[in-house]
Image (cartoon, helix red, strand yellow):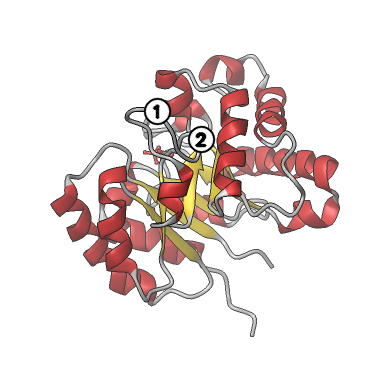
């Protein structure tokens, strides 16, 4: 049984005070949930403060990006080594990074390795754009992105895959649960091909793209989907708590 994972990508929102206030609002209700892992991904400058707020709770903290090197003369970059001292997860290959900052599969792969080398769990984002979707290329694009991101990554690496169709991110136009499930199943087949069936069956695959408290049950009811990567709706405490609560699966003791 895979534990669902619901991560909030706060993107470039919240100044420090707002981030701390949001984290404080989430701490109690998210801590009370069982059968779901919750991850908060604030902007870099708020990670330390949000992590301090989450200390002693089961809530995890992540970054939204990292550089490929552990340290060095890379002005303005944030290394996975720095992040590992503060948090547990890092989002890698988000479509906004691919779109606005030219990140390709090769760079994403370097970031996955950098995260793993430093003990961070990468949340690896993959997903087709609208043109690719309309051209029937979703499977091919997503498989290529998964293989590219995971090149030379060992089978026992702890990681999460987030299937996020680009056309569904921030648009209020989510995929259907059935379509998202089909792509998640395909991702699992790629993992099975790379690492074997057992590893693939244990891997957690999130859906992301305009998930909110109203539509999340459609995704969480799908057998191949293990939680969500949530953007806009993660900035509202009540909404994010409702989504995380809906993702929770019964705890087998
Ligand atoms: C995201 O940022 O990964 C995302 C899925 O955003 P939204 O939920 O706003 O579509």
Q: Which residue is mark 2?
A: 69
Left or right: 127 in relation to 190: left
Residue occupying the point 37% across, 34% down: 172
Furthest toward the front, the residue is: 72
Badge 2 crowding class, 10 Å Cα cut-off, few under 14, some 14 to 19, many 20 or more, is some
* As drawn, 117 above or below 98: below
In the foreground, 15 or 71: 71
Q: Which residue is mark 1?
A: 74
Left or right: 143 in relation to 112: right
Q: Secondary structure at mark 1?
A: loop
Query: In which quadrant of the rendered view does residue 76 lie?
Result: top left
In the foreground, 165 or 155: 155
* Disc assigned to residue 226: none
Give x and y (percent) for residue 129: 53, 21
Does residue 74 appear in this view?
A: yes
Give x and y (percent) for residue 38: 44, 62
Cα separation, mark 2 vs mark 1, equals 9 Å
């Amino acid at each position: 049984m895979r534990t669902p994972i619901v991560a909030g990508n706060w993107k470039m929102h919240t100044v420090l005070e707002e981030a701390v206030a949001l984290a404080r609002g989430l701490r109690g209700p998210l801590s009370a949930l069982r059968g779901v892992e919750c991850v908060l991904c604030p902007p870099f400058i708020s990670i330390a403060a949000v992590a301090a707020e989450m200390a002693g709770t089961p809530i995890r903290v992540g970054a939204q990006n990292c550089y490929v090197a552990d340290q060095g003369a890379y002005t303005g970059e944030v290394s996975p080594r720095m992040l590992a001292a503060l948090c547990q997860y890092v989002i890698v290959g988000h479509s906004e990074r691919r779109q606005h900052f030219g990140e390709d599969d090769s760079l994403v792969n370097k970031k996955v390795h950098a995260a793993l080398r430093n003990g961070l769990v990468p949340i690896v984002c993959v997903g087709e754009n609208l043109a690719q979707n309309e051209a029937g290329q979703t499977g091919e694009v997503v498989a290529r992105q998964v293989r590219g991101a995971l090149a030379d990554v060992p089978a026992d690496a702890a990681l999460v895959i987030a299937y996020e169709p680009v056309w569904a991110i921030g648009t209020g136009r989510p995929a259907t649960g059935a379509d998202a499930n089909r792509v998640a199943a395909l991702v699992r087949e790629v993992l099975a091909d790379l690492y074997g069936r057992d590893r693939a069956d244990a891997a957690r695959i999130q859906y992301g793209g305009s998930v909110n408290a109203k539509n999340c049950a459609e995704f969480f009811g799908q057998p191949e989907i293990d939680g969500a990567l949530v953007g806009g709706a993660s900035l509202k405490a009540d909404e994010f708590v409702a989504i995380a609560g809906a993702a929770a699966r019964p705890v087998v003791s």
